[in-house]
């Protein structure tokens, strides 16, 4: 049984208003460590949240600019999202914003390597782009 090679990934995040950049960064670091990922290719969230100061600051901590994913692109991958949050389904019509954002931003053939994990005010999921 061999070890899976470390890879760079796309992170999808969801967060409540008032969540700090520090909380988002800590959650991203925990996700990367859990998945043994070596780095972030992109940080994605819903298009209407990508310009939030906490999101921009968290992305900057990794040398990135947030990627805003359009509602249509999120909806297009929702069938592949394993987590179903009643709150997010009610607000956005998706099972998990973090998982959908990661999959949509990682492109066709992407797969989740870390389903949604959560902190008090944020969620994060990681997707690996297709080879």
Image (cartoon, grey):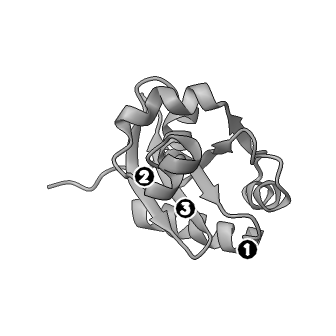
Residue 22: assigned label: 1
Q: Residue 34 vs residue 68: left or right?
A: left
Q: Nearer the viewer, mark 2 or mark 3?
A: 3
Which of the two marks, 1 or 2, is nearer to us in this view? 1
Mark 3 secondary-structure assignment:
strand
Residue under label 2: 6
Report how far apart the C-alphas of labels 2 and 3 lie in the structure.
22 Å
Q: Secondary structure at mark 1?
A: helix
Q: Is residue 50 left or right of residue 114?
A: right
User: What's the residue at 53%, 42% (across, down)?
Assistant: 102
Query: At 40% across and 26% down in the image, what residue appears?
Result: 109
Q: Is residue 57 above or below residue 121?
A: above
Q: Position of residue 59 (x, y in %)?
A: 75, 54
Q: Nearer the viewer, residue 63 or 25?
A: 25
Q: Earlier in the sequence, mark 3 or mark 1?
A: 1
Q: Quadrant where the C terminus lies?
A: top left
Q: Position of residue 66 (x, y in %)?
A: 74, 45
**Residue drawn 52% across the image and 52% down it:** 88
Question: Where on the picture, by quarter, is residue 57?
Answer: bottom right
Residue 44 on image: x %, y %: 64, 44
Task: Between residue 119 and residue 29, name the one nearer to us.
Answer: 119
**Relative depth, front residue between 48 and 44:** 48
Mark 2: few/some/many CA within 10 Å (<14, 14-19, 20+)? few
- The residue located at (57%, 43%) in the rendering is 92
Which SS class for mark 2? loop
Q: Residues within 10 Å of mark 3 (few under 14, many from 20)?
A: many
Q: CA distance from mark 3 to mark 1?
A: 13 Å
Question: Dot 3 corresponds to which residue?
Answer: 123
Q: Is residue 45 visible?
A: yes
């Amino acid at each position: 049984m061999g070890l899976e090679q470390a890879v760079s990934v796309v992170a999808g995040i969801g967060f409540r208003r008032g969540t700090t950049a520090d909380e988002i960064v800590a959650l991203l670091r925990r996700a990367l460590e859990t998945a043994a990922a070596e780095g972030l290719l992109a940080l994605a969230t819903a298009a209407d949240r990508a310009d939030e100061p906490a999101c921009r600051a968290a992305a900057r901590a990794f040398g990135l600019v947030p990627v805003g994913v359009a509602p249509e692109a999120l909806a297009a991958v929702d069938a592949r999202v394993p987590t179903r949050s009643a709150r997010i389904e009610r607000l956005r019509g998706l099972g998990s914003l973090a998982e959908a954002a990661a999959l949509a931003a990682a492109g066709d053939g992407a797969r989740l390597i870390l389903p949604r994990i959560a902190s008090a005010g944020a969620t994060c999921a990681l997707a690996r782009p297709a080879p």
